[in-house]
Image (cartoon, coloured by chain):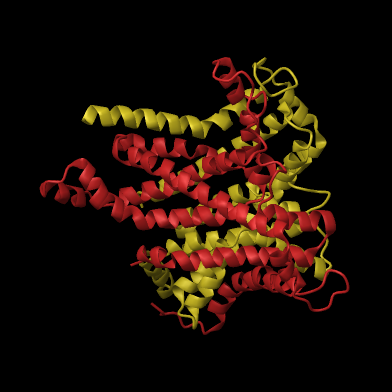
Chain colours: A red, B yellow
């Protein structure tokens, strides 16, 4: 493969800009954040207090607990909703319509976070379409408090991640060779048994990857809870942003960011066993 | 049994499509509202809120800023991504796996943390908040993506064409510009358009790193403080429309690559 005799200079000249950019604007900022997190906000000496504050202050803890709860609920609901949908698209929709069906299913995926969350605010508002439908049909006499609740945050998240997971699970189902199903049928398994014992186990690694992606993106998102959740409860990204906005406390914001990153890393290590299966 | 599965599947798919499209339909429908609240009953259609958006210089200049940041940062990201992908695919470099890992690492970190890190760094280095700072952040998030797309498309087929060019005496820069770039054009365009959509929609990095001149998502965020407003619907629908155009271009690039 390496038939080029232009010395060592050319290859390095090609890869150095990208490496340099990553080191300068990704690694170095991370180091700066780590140093900042160990610096006192007032005075600037070395301190661990930014970290100990997190463990000492129950409201900070609570933000992490809220984040983990919301993320876990969102991940489970999204997988449960997306799997059957992806299965229908892959198995029930005629082949030549599949591309269109899938493109349609993920079209709103491409709206920006801000616009998508705002749209849900419209839907869930006091006088919004959902409340109009509920009171209009006589199911409820009073409009429900839907916006500015945890339920609204979860709805906004699930909406996004159902689309993301539909994409990943669909791809997984399509990669499955039809001969597996044929073999199961030849051996006398019905459709249900084939699904439970063949299709589901074979797509499980893909589901794990999608679920992990959901976890990472969900726990780090500031917009959805900020727009839809209101101020009743805080999630971690909101707590981080509050430190910058209100008090300009970069060291505490840095420490909280690093704690958030640590949690994602722990989750990754916990899932690594399943995430690896896919590569094998 | 079969008919039952079909019926249940159909209903379920319909329900999920409904859920997925509900907010988008409400957004676009009430952007055409004639009165001042984007809630039922629908009083339109009217284009007055689109006129209001186009008359709002803050929004129109934010739109221009967003396009500028998206085009420039994506061009930088795809250039750096392409050059490094070519370098790694064609030459055996010591520690290549590690370096490739480093370039793709930002994909695993949330935008909030990337933005926070740059904010702390720029704050220390005395770099003022600006569109340039946000653009640097957008290159950080899109470079790994461009690299991965281009790198995954560099096969032996292209190596042989390049080798033929070299055998015929073409210097390295000519091989790059006249052979590699045209051959890799679909992957390069795909990386560029995907970067454009991510940069165009990105909020938190721009929010942290810009101040007066800002991008459209941040300006929309500022609009949200005034509550529900059909003008926000109108500008949101426009942002959505631009994203769809970019995605369709991206799809076309992918489709065109297929027959090759």
The answer to whether residue B38 is above or below residue B251 is above
The answer to whether residue B153 is above or below residue A185 is below
Please give left or right for residue A274 compared with residue B100 in the image. left
Q: Count the marks.
A: 0
Please give left or right for residue B250 compared with residue B132 in the image. left
Please give left or right for residue B131 compared with residue B199 in the image. right
Residue B228 appearing in the image: yes
Q: Position of residue A131 (x, y in %)?
A: 61, 24
In the displayed image of the protein, which residue is found farthest to the right? A43
Q: Position of residue A114 (x, y in %)?
A: 66, 42
The answer to whether residue A40 is above or below residue B192 is below
Residue A56, by quadrant, is bottom right
In the foreground, B190 or B42: B42
Q: Can you say which quadrant of the picture contains the N terminus of chain B?
A: top left
Q: Position of residue B43 (x, y in %)?
A: 67, 14
Residue B222, by quadrant, is top right
Residue A177 appearing in the image: no
In the foreground, A76 or A58: A58
Q: Residue at x 78, y 58 (%)?
A: A243
The answer to whether residue B4 is above or below residue B187 is above
Q: Residue at x 43, y 57 (%)?
A: A209
Q: Position of residue B184 (x, y in %)?
A: 47, 59
Please give left or right for residue A274 compared with residue A127 in the image. left
């Amino acid at each position: 493969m390496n038939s080029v005799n232009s010395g060592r200079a050319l290859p390095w000249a090609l890869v150095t800009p990208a490496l340099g950019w990553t080191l300068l604007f990704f690694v170095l900022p991370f180091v700066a954040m780590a140093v900042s997190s160990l610096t006192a906000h007032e005075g600037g000496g070395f301190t661990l207090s930014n970290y100990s504050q997190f463990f000492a202050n129950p409201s900070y803890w609570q933000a992490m607990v809220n984040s983990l709860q919301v993320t876990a609920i969102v991940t489970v609901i999204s997988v449960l909703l997306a799997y059957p949908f992806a299965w229908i698209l892959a198995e029930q929709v005629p082949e030549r319509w599949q591309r269109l069906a899938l493109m349609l299913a993920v079209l709103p995926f491409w709206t920006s976070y801000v616009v998508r969350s705002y749209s849900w605010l419209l839907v869930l508002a006091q006088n919004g379409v959902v409340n109009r439908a509920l009171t209009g049909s006589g199911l409820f006499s009073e409009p429900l408090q839907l916006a500015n609740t945890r339920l609204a945050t979860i709805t906004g998240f699930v909406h996004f991640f159902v689309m993301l997971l539909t994409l990943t699970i669909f791809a997984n189902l399509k990669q499955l060779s039809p001969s597996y199903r044929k073999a199961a049928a030849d051996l006398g398994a019905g459709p249900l048994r084939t699904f439970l014992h063949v299709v589901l186990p074979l797509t499980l690694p893909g589901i794990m990857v999608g679920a992990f992606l959901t976890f990472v993106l969900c726990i780090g998102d500031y917009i959805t809870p900020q727009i839809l959740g209101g101020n009743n409860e805080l999630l971690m990204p909101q707590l981080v942003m509050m430190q910058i906005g209100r008090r300009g406390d970069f060291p505490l914001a840095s420490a909280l960011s690093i704690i958030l990153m640590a949690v994602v890393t722990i989750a990754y290590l916990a899932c690594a066993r399943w995430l690896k299966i896919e590569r094998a | 049994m079969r008919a039952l599965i079909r019926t249940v599947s159909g209903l379920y798919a319909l329900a999920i499509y409904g859920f997925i499209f509900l907010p988008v339909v409400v957004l676009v429908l009430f952007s055409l509202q004639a009165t001042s609240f984007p809630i039922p009953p629908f009083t339109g259609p009217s284009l007055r809120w689109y006129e209001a958006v186009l008359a709002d210089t803050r929004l129109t200049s934010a739109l221009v800023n967003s396009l500028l940041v998206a085009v420039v940062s994506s061009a930088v990201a795809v250039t750096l991504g392409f050059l490094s992908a070519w370098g790694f695919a064609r030459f055996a470099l010591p520690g290549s796996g590690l370096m490739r890992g480093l370039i793709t690492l930002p994909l695993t970190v949330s935008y909030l943390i990337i933005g926070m890190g740059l904010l702390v760094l720029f704050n220390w280095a005395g770099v003022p908040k600006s569109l340039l700072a946000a653009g640097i952040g957008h290159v950080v998030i899109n470079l790994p993506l461009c690299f991965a797309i281009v790198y995954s498309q560099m096969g032996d087929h292209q190596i042989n064409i390049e080798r033929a060019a070299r055998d015929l005496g073409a210097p390295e820069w000519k091989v790059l510009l006249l052979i590699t770039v045209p051959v890799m054009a679909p992957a390069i365009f795909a990386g560029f358009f995907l970067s454009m959509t991510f940069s165009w929609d990105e909020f938190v990095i721009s929010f942290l790193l810009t101040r007066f001149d800002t991008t459209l998502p941040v300006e929309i965020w500022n609009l949200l403080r005034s509550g529900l407003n059909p003008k926000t619907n109108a500008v949101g629908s426009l942002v959505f429309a631009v994203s769809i155009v970019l995605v369709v271009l991206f799809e076309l690039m992918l489709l065109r690559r297929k027959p090759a």
